[in-house]
Amino acid sequence: MDDPDDLEDHAEDARRARWTASVTGVLLTLMGIAAALLRCAGPAPALAPAAYALGAVVCAPAAVLGHRGHTRRALWLLIAGVMVMAVGDQVD
């Protein structure tokens, strides 16, 4: 039989993973939008703000997926979004 304490620990771990994925997705989305806007105002090549904006677009669904409990998919989207934003950083 499963111990009730183990079930509570598992539920707490799942809740923490959902919150972490959701909050990280929201923060990375906001940071990508802010970076895109800052790069648009400066003398950066056009690819830099586009990469930041595209990275933010990739991170936004990760927040939704994390909230719904699909934390593995959210993690992979967050990784992909950050990688796209890194391209913008390298272009700049």
Image: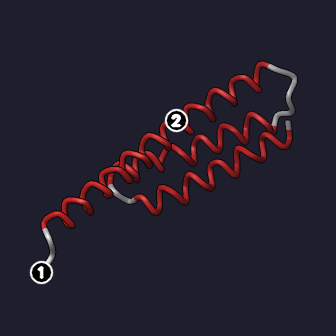
Which of the colour schemes (rainbow, by chain, secondary structure, one colour) is used?
secondary structure
Report helix, strand or loop for mark 2.
Answer: helix
**Disc 2 marks which amino acid?**
Leu
Residue 39 sits in quarter: top right
Residue located at (32% from left, 53% from top): 68
Residue located at (60% from left, 32% from top): 31
Query: Is 64 left, or right, of 81 in this rendering?
Result: left
Q: Position of residue 89 (x, y in %)?
A: 79, 40
Distance from the alpha carbon under mark 2 to that under mark 1 = 40 Å
Q: Position of residue 36 (x, y in %)?
A: 69, 30
Query: Is 12 left, or right, of 79 in this rendering?
Result: left
Q: Which residue is mark 2?
A: 27
Q: Which residue is mark 1?
A: 1
Frontmost residue, 81 versus 6: 6
In the picture as drawn, the residue positioned furthest to the top comes out as: 41
Q: Is residue 66 above or below residue 30?
A: below
State how many labels appear.
2
Q: Which callout, 2 or 1, points at the residue further toward the start of the chain?
A: 1
